[in-house]
Amino acid sequence: MLPELRIPRRDTTSISVFRGLNRSPNTGFSRVSSSSSSIYTEFKDLKNMTSDKYPQLAPRANRSRITSDDKIKIISNLLSANSGLIYIDSDKNLHIGAEVTKIDKIDAEKQHHIVLYGNKVVVFPEKFSVNISNKKVTMIDCQNKDLSTRVETKSNLQLDASTFDYAYLLCSITRSYYDASANKNYRPSITLYTNNDLTDTKYQLTSNKDMVDIFSLNDIKIGTVIESYNNFYSVIGIEKKDSTFKKNRLLNFKKLSQKFNYTTIRAKNIGLHIEVGDFVKISGLTDSLVSTDAESYADKTYVENLNGKTFKVYYVSKNELVIKCELESSVPYTGTVTVERISPDFDEGKIVEMQNRLWCCSSDKNEIYCCKQGDERNWQAYSDGISTDSWAMTCGKEGKFTGIATRGDSVIFFKENYALKIYGTKPSNFTLAEYNVPGVEIGSEKSLVNINSTLFYLGHNGVYAYQSGSLPALISEESLWGHTYKNAVGGRHGNKYYISAERDDGEQELLVYDTDKGLWHKEDAAKMIDCTTYNGVLYWIDETKENIMCPDKADNLLVDNTKYEYQQEDCFEWSAETGDLYDGEFNVKNIGKIRIGIKAEKGAKVSLFVQYKDNGEWRKVSEMLYSEKKPRVFAVALRRAEYLRLKLVGTGQVEIYGIDIEHSRGSDKRGNI
């Protein structure tokens, strides 16, 4: 009997599902076999490809660009609101949609960070807000420094203790009573420093004919409020003869019933840019008093009680303000005073809005802050003890803050190895929960993006997805294998996460994660400086800081034809590179022919390259130019090899809908090629 010849078995594997990027050693067609229950492929490298046509493979859409004068740079991050895009340019203009407002307070030499807060745009580092509706500018911080106080005396008043035992002054620091219902501040008209006890019965008149000889005051009038040391009195009656006040007057002093636990401070321009309800810090007070007998009687604890402390303002006018502070007596203070409403110095860019508050953090002080609810100007409103108070805390975890984000009803502060989550609705129930999890990589605070219920960000070893009720999960291990990334900027386009980051070898990459399909694709080396999402469309500032880009055609609502030039991308190169086709399950198979089905638009060009050695030369084996829109098939015979990679390179819009691989089974021994 003649020997039976063994005819190699020939098989065809058809692939119609094209997944995304996988740079790990497990890439390529290693998951393809005749016994595979899930036949698909991933790619070792991609350029300008997208998951939009999944399961088919296709290039991304043509981008659009909004440009302005190339001599003007964008010097802020990018925001969006109902009116459109919001940013600041180097000509000191604040752009809110199509409206442009010149703001002289902007320092054109600095980079700015802006944040939306209700109907306002808050600008840092200058610390002011702009009302979107009327463009009114309001300063957050107010520093009225080294203001001159004034102590009034009368020219004919003799302040000589050898003659009189009193001093009569209109003090600059005065004990007061504030009537909130009438919005009125009551304070003594004069302050009397005297040894006389005005509560003594000898000053309580029993008859209008009684004469009380205590001193000579020129401007005492009925209803005048007089303060003596530690007491307040009002004048009941004055005897007047021939329109002239005599030395001996009929006076009846009545002790007032109000509790004067407020303090009025009078100084030139002390009330400028300060409003009722503000919390201000008093400083700069010394023990400078008027040189009179009053200095012997004045209580010196005013410096300790006022200096360096923060008080709520209950009443304010240009030259005086009322704070809640109880002093022993009014003070004839003649020095200067500083009144400040200040916000904390926080890490650049690390500020968000949540529950009608601004939240930020300071790495230098390792502290977390939020402003008073509904008031971006007040960050030290602690004394009221109500739900709208501001709030601050010191963090116990080491390291710099690397990012801040909101998720659901909580604010999350990141460090490289921690997530610090704050729950609650008011200062009395704010609660900090600390999690020892991979945090945001330092320098990548702009990579934090919320998409649906998931927070995405770049950590020190890849991109993480942080879902409610779970710990952050690494989602880029295989796709971004072999490289670490830094200085990332992230954004949302539909349900896709765009991230622009610098690779450890210095290369810049724009990567896209489809959150619905779980696929990664790489676009190109575009660098995003900052970005925002408007009506579901991503817009970013490019590396020149002159242009605003978006992945699709620009929304016509954002294009002001009188200001912007709208440009559509014409043509770009795309590519898709497989892994080693002989890797993994193929177990010594010989690929004889590959057929690739491609549908393309008119004018598209596609080339097929083959690599037969690892890191070897790429050889072009076929090229096709589409003169009309129709499907065509690349049919390429390949020589026998132990290593094989394919790369498709093209221009124009195409859809790769299938690959057929004809292969035959060989022996279990590999030969030398």
Image (spheres, rainbow, N blue to C red):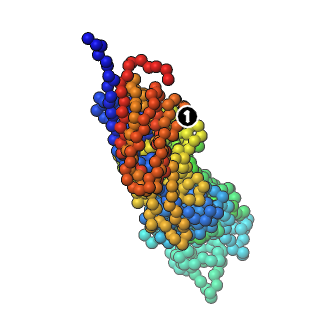
Q: Which residue lies furthest to the front in this view?
A: 1
Amino acid type at image mark 1: Glu
Q: Could you say which quadrant of the image residue 670 lies in?
A: top left
At x 65%, y 72%, the residue is 215
Position of the N terminus by quadrant: top left
Above or below, 664 against 556 in this view is above
Q: Position of residue 623 (x, y in %)?
A: 48, 45
At x 67%, y 70%, the residue is 152
Asked whether the viewer can see residue 244, the reply is: yes
At x 69%, y 58%, the residue is 288
Q: Where is residue 353 in the image (x, y as percent from the top left)?
A: 45, 55
Q: What element carries label 1?
A: loop
At x 58%, y 53%, the residue is 543
Residue receiving disc 1? 617
Above or below, 539 against 420 in this view is below
Q: Which of 275 and 541 is in front in this view?
A: 541
Q: Which of 269 and 648 is in front in this view?
A: 648
Asked whether the viewer can see residue 371, the reply is: no
Q: Which of 561 and 227 is in front in this view?
A: 561
Q: Which residue lies furthest to the bottom in this view?
A: 242
Q: Where is residue 49 in the image (x, y as percent from the top left)?
A: 45, 47
Q: Residues within 10 Å of mark 1 (few under 14, many from 20)?
A: few
